[in-house]
Image: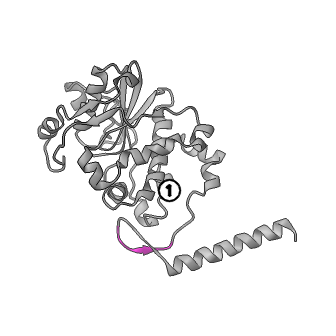
Amino acid sequence: MNPDVSGATHRGIVRIWNAFKGALFPLTCLMCGQFYLQRPGLSKSFQRGAVFNELIKKPPSVFLFSRLMTSYVCPVCAQQFTPIESPCCTCCGIMFKSREGVDHLCGECLNSKQFFGMARAVGVYDQALMAVIHGLKYGEKVGLATPLSILLLSAYQYFWHDRPMDLVVPVPLYGRRLRKRGFNQVYLAIRHWEDQKWQGALPALPMVAREVLRRKRSTPPQTGLGRRERMQNMKDAFELSASHAIIKKRILLVDDVYTTGATVRECARILLKEGAEAVDILTLARAM
């Protein structure tokens, strides 16, 4: 049989099967709760290909989010993803309400000492991005770790292309909370950076250092606390478990959500105090 004909036949069968499967087992959108038919996402061959490599060198976009989340968020709700775009604060990364002008320091960073050099996020903590973060964090949809990892990788490639880091350190959970949840959602979202398919196709990625930081005491949830209470809540909540690993290293600290910055600021303070050369922050979301 002609290979072209055989290939076309196979693709036709796959399309028919996917349509049949979608009709029998429709997906439920994490955001609106409605059933929807799955659209083609990012295939494994695409993820390893040149088009993908070029795509993730650009900042996270609605297009990339929509394609990555095709199994979790319906096409309509996926459009509610808001990427972080200029103008934003050159330090903490908060996106200014006015969409005119250039990047500059916000009032908070002008008036307060920050222990990190630069903080950036994939998108605004709202709508679709909030839904997928909650799906991973509270809904135990661990499959979301892979698309979220790609979004973080896209942000890193774009914002840190001329600012390479040595280590990637996830913000840790307290032991009791980790055992109850069963996983650290931040670590799940960055562990894929160690996969050979990323290391071989992209510029050298920093090594993931999971055990560097330890949360030494339980802290009440930050939700509902004001800025001052959040700062007090996080004071002396962390310690280093491998101080030798960070000496003169440039650390990329990763967390899920940046709200007031209390958590990452305290982590950065500890890392710098113990000998890190510099600390930057990357989060999935930035509260506005």
Q: Disc 1 residue type?
A: Leu
Residue 206: image location, x then y, percent: 49, 32
Compared to residue 190, the image places residue 132 above or below, namely: below
Specify the principal SS of the magenta part: loop
**In the rendered image, which quarter contains the N terminus?**
bottom right
Horizontal arrangement in the rendering, residue 92 relative to residue 15 (left or right) = left
Task: Pick out the residue farthest to the right.
Answer: 1
Q: Quadrant of residue 246?
A: top left
* Residue shown at 36% from the left, 49% from the top: 185
Q: Identify the residue under disc 1.
A: 68
Please tell me which residue lies in front, 266 or 258: 266
Name the element at disc 1.
helix
Horizontal arrangement in the rendering, residue 213 relative to residue 67 (left or right) = left
**In the rendered image, which quarter contains the C terminus?**
top left
How many marks the image carries: the answer is 1
Residue 24: image location, x then y, percent: 51, 81
Is residue 88 visible in this depiction of the protein?
yes
Compared to residue 271, the image places residue 8 above or below, namely: below
Please tell me which residue lies in front, 58 or 4: 4
Residue 241: image location, x then y, percent: 31, 30
Q: Which residues are magenta?
A: 32-37
Horizontal arrangement in the rendering, residue 268 relative to residue 165 (left or right) = left
Residue 153: image location, x then y, percent: 48, 42
Q: Is residue 35 magenta?
A: yes
Q: Is residue 103 magenta?
A: no
* Residue shown at 65% from the left, 54% from the top: 45
